[in-house]
Amino acid sequence: MCGIVGYVGSKTAVDILIEGLTSLEYRGYDSSGVALNIEGKVQLFKAQGKLQNLRNIVQNNYDEISKSTIGIGHIRWATHGVPSVENAHPHTCNCGKVAIVHNGIIENFKELKAKLEANGCTFRSQTDTETIAHLVATKYGETKDLTEAVRLATQEIEGAYAIAVIHQDVKNTIVATRRNAPLVVGFGEDENFVASDIPALIKYTKKAMYLDDNQIVTITPNSVKLIDIDNNPKELKIETLPWEPVALSKMGYKHFMLKEIHEQPDIVRNVLAGKLRTMDAPIELNEVTLNKEKLKNLSRIQIVACGTSLHAAMVGKYLIEDFCGIPVDVEPSSEYIYRKTITNENTLVIGVSQSGETADTITAVRQAKKKGSHILIVTNRPDSTMAREADSLIPVNAGIEVSVAATKSYMAQLISFYLLAIYMAEVKGSMPKDEVSKLKHELILLPQKIDNILTAKGDIQKCARKFANSKDFIFIARGVNYATALEGALKLKEISYINATGYTAGELKHGPIAMLDESMPVLSVLMKGKVYDKILSNAEEAKARNARMIALTNSEDFKLDELFENIIRVPDVMEILSPALAIVPLQLLAYYIAEFLGKDVDQPRNLAKSVTVE
Ligand code: F6R
């Protein structure tokens, strides 16, 4: 949520900043800006809307702008103040010498603003960030030392932040700091970098250092100095990143989302590789460091997550309870953190997050950690803030996900939960061996079945066209696929802005059925198994209210043709594994509807990929 990047060296700063912001676009895209020191004067260039608007401004002033070899840049996801040029970062102080970019939320900004205004500061934006610019300028006036000014300013700021600051009078220097928001420093030859995330600097260097909370870094082309909030010098812990420069290529697909949907068969293969070797060998999950005796005696598991990751967690709950008989609670992190939770050292707490930077989930796992729980993190970013809180870390290995709507990371999370639940069942001995072998066998067959769905995507495209002009959409399912209905609905509303809701099919008649008429599509996730007949009955009830009926099914039953106007078929699969297949057509349906409606599929309005504010 908001991306920041800073460069100091001898190259054209703006090129590196814009390239960095391009790779951070997933963090926000409602406005952007850069601050550059051009021939001794700090100058700002800002634009509302997509990054392309900033690129155009830069292009029009390139002769002048390209002289600068130091600057900071920002891509915004609005929290305080509408997306506009005046609210776009960087922000500056009265004299215009300080420029600052910020990711996070300053919780006491109203008090700070009142104090600063009383001291003569004039605010030009509605943002909380501008308070930091004035505060740093005030402290600089007192100390004439930028690092000290930032250090003193952070002592007055409450909330979450990653910031980078330049000052006109402090040549070739960027000062940056963080608290509960990610920040990484990149080390080059006669040049250094700072950014919210690795993709912004990986093209230039693999040497990097993640800042800890409350550390302050002072960066020049030839030096990086680190201190803590009490002004104690800290050792630089430089890591060599195992990353390759990220290929942000759509590989011929129209959108990243479509490309990422198509990557799913390989992702399933990747996640299984090395862990599931043969039908008879136990699952190898060395990442789980929880002692096997403790694992056998676990009385409770709590899973915390948000959005799509929460839906993966719901499937995880179903699997662990079914395979291992351990009670599992799943809760949105944003709820977990504001109530009295019964979490203690006998609880295993699992945090699930694609980005590993979701503020609510980070807070939730930190709270659980304080209570002595073992923390298991399931994430696509083993280098993230959340991963660093983990006692056990399961990287899901989906690769960088560019599209804001999560697809392949959901698949990787699901498969990771299958492996975890089977691993736990094997440790506990809670499942008959032949059932475990059958599950493993079916897991290995999944990638081919997903491939088959992708090959037949033309049918889903036709269905999408037929229903694209619907104002509302209902998804119903039961059991392990309730999460599939929720995730299908979430995908559709995120990228097409159609009001879509997922219900357990049994709940339909307890209220939502009132909404049904001939204009309402009802999509039933109808997988063969324990709840098939029940969902069919619920679908009949919807049909009796004239709803437009769509089935997503692995059944060949010819009676379905009478009940459903559209049938999307998936290959046969065990019911317990069906969420991993059933979600694929729903991702495609959402994609094709949004594409047909001409929506901005990869960067839907109001959203950001990494939600680093609570
Ligand atoms: C939906 C989506 C979001 C995220 C949610 C949590 O497509 O991407 O709902 O799932 O913001 O993010 P992570 O998984 O990064 O914690």
Image: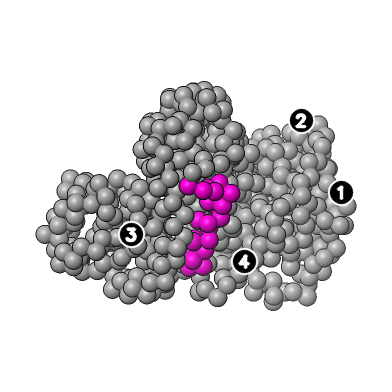
Label 2, label 1: how far apart the Cα atoms are: 21 Å
Q: Which mark is residue 248?
A: 4
Residue 523 appears in the picture as rendered: no
Disc 1: CA contacts within 10 A as few (<14), some (14-19) or many (>=20): few
Report x, y in % for residue 246. Answer: 66, 62
Residue 266 drawn in magenta: yes
Label 1, label 4: how far apart the Cα atoms are: 31 Å
Q: Which residue is mark 3?
A: 572
The residue stretch that appears in magenta = 257-279
Disc 4: CA contacts within 10 A as few (<14), some (14-19) or many (>=20): few
Determine whether, in the image, residue 245 is placed left or right of residue 123. Answer: right
Q: Which residue is drawn at the image coordinates 45% and 40% (left, top)?
A: 421
Looking at the rendered image, the disc whose residue lies closer to the viewer, 4 or 2, is 4
Q: Which residue is mark 1?
A: 223
Report x, y in % for residue 364. Answer: 51, 35
Instruction: Please tell me whether mark 2 sits on a helix, a strand or a loop.
Output: loop
Q: Which residue is mark 2?
A: 230
Report x, y in % for residue 468. Answer: 32, 70
Q: Amino acid at mark 2?
A: Asp
